[in-house]
Amino acid sequence: MDSLQQRSSTVQEPPGAARAYRPTPPPAWRPRTDPAPLLPDAEPLRVLGTDAVADADPELLRRLYRELVRGRRYNAQATALTKQGRLAVYPSTTGQEAAEVAAALVLEERDWLFPSYRDTLAAVARGLDPVQALTLLRGDWHTGYDPREHRIAPLSTPLATQLPHAVGLAHAARLKGDDVVALAMVGDGGTSEGDFHEALNFAAVWQAPVVFLVQNNGFAISVPLAKQTAAPSLAHKAVGYGMPGRLVDGNDAVAVHQVLTEAVARARRGGGPTLVEAVTYRIDAHTNADDATRYRGDSEVEAWRAHDPVLILERELTERGILDEDARRAAAEEAETMAARLRESMNADPVLDPMDLFAHVYAEKTAQLREQAAQLRAELDAESEAE
């Protein structure tokens, strides 16, 4: 006890002491890892327009193109449905299709995708029925699909809450010995949420097989990135948690696919999590309820249109002889077929069962839920008898 008191009094020397006490930290303070390999590159990785594209699989390039064309048409059709009153709200990913599609294509069937509310296109690219993907945004039902069947976590509007869920699933899978990777998507605005930081911290400490994909589209609704963070990039945030950060051109579908493929492979072999920042842009407004002209100019939007993910991939593939007119026409026709089916399905009035309000809330209904369900059933039966 005397020695503890002596050390304490030595550390807390009064102001004006002749010589300040400067202790040498014990070895435990030193970094567990060398931070240098964790740092992202100074510039976003690009493949299109470089010699590296020659090494890409032509069939993968054609598939990326088809999915981008379908994704662009999906965004346009969903946006139109909001104007027709068939969708309550739609957060478009026009301009962000490259990151959305790449996120879906890098995963194996056994892996899990954890999307944000804006990532309906990623879910569709993974194989989810477009109508089911929009069910939540239409307000028809709980989620619209079975998460276990598709290995896609529920789409939901709270920001970043899916990230800790992704870490938990990935960690549990590793404990069970399952060869599963979770890919969690979030926007730049979501990185300002506490769930983002908690998820990264747990993922790094547990070395969970999870990949975090941040789509930096410039704005959190109307708040530009510069008013959210002073970090050199969002990818730099990875270093503080002890995981690699990667910076990629989010409109370069080939580059995003390459970076995510490497991150997923690293996670699967036990290398731990990776944070990937895809630098992209939100061409459309935040949602159909937003007026983006109040916080950004047309010149900014037009500058990004010149870096359109669909056009730059189409131009590259055409110049290299990988894409011809027949392939372009086939991609457009496939996208139009999808859009027509989406219109037809969404224009039909849904058949809803009010009793579904009480389904999937708890595994076993509480006494209060049973009471409420009984009351609603009695009211519905009374209305039916009155008709």
Image: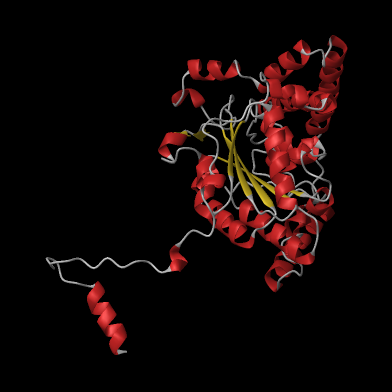
Q: Residue at x 79, y 25 (%)?
A: 61
- The answer to which quarter of the image holds residue 136 is top right
Compared across the picture, whether 376 is left or right of 291 comes to: right
Count of marks overlaid on the render: 0
Q: Is residue 67 above or below residue 16?
A: above
Is residue 147 among what the camera can see? yes
- The answer to which quarter of the image holds residue 89 is top right
- The answer to which quarter of the image holds residue 27 is bottom left
Residue lying at the far bottom in this picture: please name it. 1
Is residue 224 among what the camera can see? no
Compared across the picture, whether 281 is left or right of 170 comes to: left
In the rendering, at what x and y percent does residue 107 appear? 78, 43
Q: Quadrant of the N terminus?
A: bottom left
Q: Residue at x 69, y 20 (%)?
A: 51
Compared across the picture, whether 232 is left or right of 309 comes to: left
Q: Is residue 324 above or below residue 286?
A: above
Q: Is residue 380 above or below residue 315?
A: below
Q: Residue at x 68, y 70 (%)?
A: 368
